Amino acid sequence: MSEISEDEIQIMDVDWMPFHPNPQKPAFKPPVGAVDAHCHVFGPANKFPFAPQRKYTPCDASKDQLFALRDHLGFSRNVIVQASCHGRNNDALIDALISSEGLARGVAVIAPDISDDELSQMHDAGVRAVRFNFVKRLVDATPKQVFLDIAERIARLGWHIVVYFEAADLEELIPFLQQLPTIVVVDHMGRPDVSKSLSDVDFQRFVRLIDENENIWTKVSCPERLSNGGPPYGDVIPFSNLLVERFPNRVLWGTDWPHPNMKSHMPDDGELVDLIPQIAPTAQLQQALLVDNPMRLYWPEIIIEGK
Ligand code: 0GY
């Protein structure tokens, strides 16, 4: 068998869809201080190589491109989530946080044996949460006890937990989620099957979970990933809208730029922003979704006066 060099295996997957090269300027103007609370940076691979155990190899998506998109869309801040292609090496994330000069916070993926010093350095850089990923196509399974041990350590820092799972796995995960000692943010509305109705048993289980657990929040993100019909994602909006109206103080919104693992199409980020008035129809709901909620969670120390 011939040897494969590290350079060769860092080339993006042949079916990888790169992010939209020139998203439109949205017609919707986000409120002052709006936060894109779910996005990623990838590499650049020559500086921050992807993890050997990754399940996909993306194109580079740099911090500078992310910050340019932030400004173009009319947002002020980012929450950058460590993506599975970087494994537990958070260097690209930390580099982006430091470069943001306080305008980005981070969600890291960490090992249970991380030292207190490393955690403290991450905190100084802007990390405020860890992500527990249960999506089998993205990561190998981690024992729940490992996650519980991590949860206990990061709770002491005032951090919270972001979880990503498929709707089919929720029932089994509920006892675990209810043991977590911090705020818990569920990615992408728990990935509902939007071909079903709002009264479907799986989606109602998710709504009940948030109803019954005051520490559980969700991101009303990723219409492009959940939709069966494609843009303008009319099949997803009722799910996002229900959650925003019912839990106005426990919802976040994000672009999910650079949209890893999209296979059907690549969304225009400007069009995603233009969906916000349908998801959150009043100025009050928009202010909570885009400013007050993410600021409370990621920048509690800042009282917003302008930017
Ligand atoms: C997302 C969704 C995905 C990927 C990741 O960490 C990741 O690789 O989160 C996905 O493929 O559904 O939130 O970006």
Image (spheres, rainbow, N blue to C red):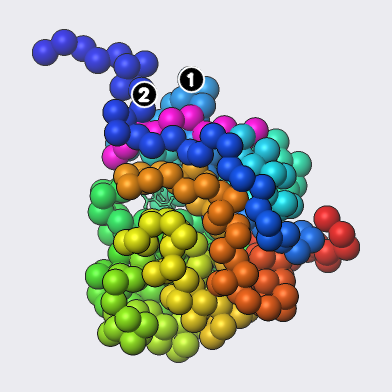
- The quadrant in which the N terminus is found is top left
- The quadrant in which the C terminus is found is bottom right
Q: For the stretch drawn in magenta, what is the main secondary structure?
A: loop
Answer left or right for 35 relative to 9.
right
- Does residue 302 show up magenta in the picture? no
Please say if the residues under marks 1 and 2 sit with CB atoms less than 8 Å apart: yes
Q: Which residues are magenta?
A: 55-64
Residue farthest along the left direction in this orientation: 1
Residue at the image point whose x is 26% and y is 69% from the top = 169
Q: Earlier in the sequence, mark 1 or mark 2?
A: 2
Answer left or right for 187 relative to 252.
left
Label annotation for residue 10: 2
Q: Which of these two is toward me, 24 or 48?
A: 24
Describe the element under mark 2 as helix, strand or loop: loop
Q: Is residue 5 above or below residue 86?
A: above
Answer left or right for 54 relative to 289.
left
Residue at the image point whose x is 40% and y is 87% from the top = 208
Q: Position of residue 83 (x, y in %)?
A: 44, 45
Q: Position of residue 300 (x, y in %)?
A: 73, 66
The three-letter amino acid code for the residue at tag 2 is Gln
The three-letter amino acid code for the residue at tag 1 is Asn
Label annotation for residue 46: 1
Question: Can see residue 44?
Answer: yes
